[in-house]
Amino acid sequence: MKQRVVVGMSGGVDSSVSAHILKEAGYEVVGLFMKNWDSALNKDVLGNPDLAADLCPQEKDYQDAKNVAEKLGIELHRVEFIEEYWRDVFTDFLDECKKGRTPNPDILCNKHIKFDAFARHAERFAPDAIAMGHYARIKEDQGRISLLRGIDPNKDQTYFLSRLSEEKLANVLFPIGKFTKEEVREIAKKASLPTADKKDSTGICFIGERSFADFLKNYLPAKKGLIKTEDGETVGEHEGLMHYTIGQRKGLGIGGIKGYPDEPWFVIGKDLAKNTLLVGQGYHHPGLYATSCTLDDLNIITEGTFKEKSPLQAKFRHRQKDKPVRVEKIDSVWHVRFERPVRAVTPGQACVLYDGEICLGGGFIDKVKKNDTILPY
């Protein structure tokens, strides 16, 4: 009997090619489209319900997934995880924004929705495995499963999978992890898939093409405050601390201030107690560089792959170049120490750890320290 695989089909080229590859390999493929957000239901278009269809392209994505399924001759089913997404992803996103942090909902979406709610729903089809269109790879060695970077360094998505466990990855396939994006596009064209030339989605799924600030105003009241330099000089007014992130340059509305050099301004910090946004001039302003950070917690994907104080690599943002670090636990708190200062390390974002090709796991950045002594490892 053919092995049955349930594929998450988003209506994009990556998941389309994943389904195609599996079918060509002889699997019995079942497609499953997830709807995780409902603009009207979730009230982000209050006062203008006619915008709901325009703001969320999921119906178009579903039709694209349906067209691909028909082309491949496979079943496509549809499931809604709106309630689960709101409870497990979006409420956490709002809570982090309230704290002035910069959350990454895609990481929680992978943990709670794509590799949990989706996997449980897929069980009704009695699959041998589930598959996703992520640029990542799985390695099995003596019964242990490790998560490896995708071959394409520009598309590698292990950063967003860092909260998964070995157990969650046990029956997962990533068919396109061994290909570059260009190769995936070429496969789609050769197979005449309807999504071959479809533009990649960008940004946070539930915000779409909208302004981040406009979106948040529907859920969190903006509290304006002062923009100040490290010396306490007021140079402007901000629209609410939740709208800014460390290292941000655009949207500050300041420049050409008398007495200051003609250099760009960047966000270097936030004072939540005083509702003040702190800024400094110059891309390499000292206030933008950190020497260590702490993590809320640390998820290790595969037991036995992580050793404290050993030389590792870390990413503090997706597509960021690897940064050499060492990690140790002190008084129940995980500390990540950088070999060299790192720019724009941001509370709320993920610190994802690597040992060469292997993604070890990661945690969410809590406190950022800018004046630690650089340890002579």
Image: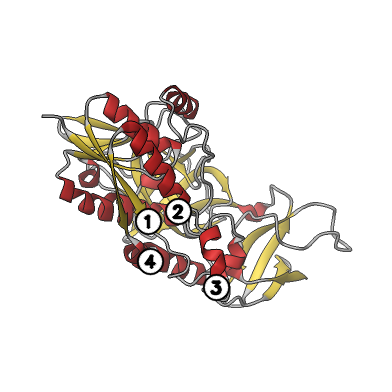
Q: CA distance from mark 1 to mark 3?
A: 21 Å
- Between the C-alphas of marks 3 and 2, the distance is 20 Å
Q: Secondary structure at mark 3?
A: loop
User: Can you tell which quarter of the image residue 158 is in?
Assistant: top left
Kindly report the distance in space between the C-alpha atoms of the residues bearing marks 4 and 1.
Answer: 12 Å
Q: Amino acid at mark 4?
A: Trp
Q: What numbered label is drawn on residue 84? A: none
The mark lying in front, picked from 2 and 4, is: 2
Q: Is residue 136 visible?
A: no
339 versus 345 height, above or below? above
| For marks 4 and 1 on the same chain, the one whose residue lies earlier in the sequence | 1
Which circle, 3 or 2, is nearer the viewer?
A: 2
Query: Residue 248: in sight, yes or no?
Result: yes
| Mark closest to the chain's N terminus, 1 or 2 | 1
Residue 169 image point, x, y percent = 25, 42
Q: Residue, x 44% and y 41% (percent of image)?
A: 12
Assign the C terminus to one quadrant of the image.
top left
Say if 329 sits above or below 166 in the image. below
Frontmost of labels 4 and 1 is: 1
Q: Residues within 10 Å of mark 2 (few under 14, many from 20)?
A: many
Badge 2 is on which residue? 58
Residue type, mark 3 in image: Asn
Mark 1: which secondary structure? strand
Using residue 74 as the reference point, say whether residue 253 is left or right of it.
Answer: right
The residue where tag 1 is placed is: 35
For numbered disc 4, what is the local secondary structure? helix
Q: Are marks 4 and 1 in contact (CB under 8 Å)?
A: no
Q: Check disc 1: other Cα within 10 Å, few if <14, some if 14-19, many if 20+.
A: some
Residue type at mark 2?
Answer: Gln
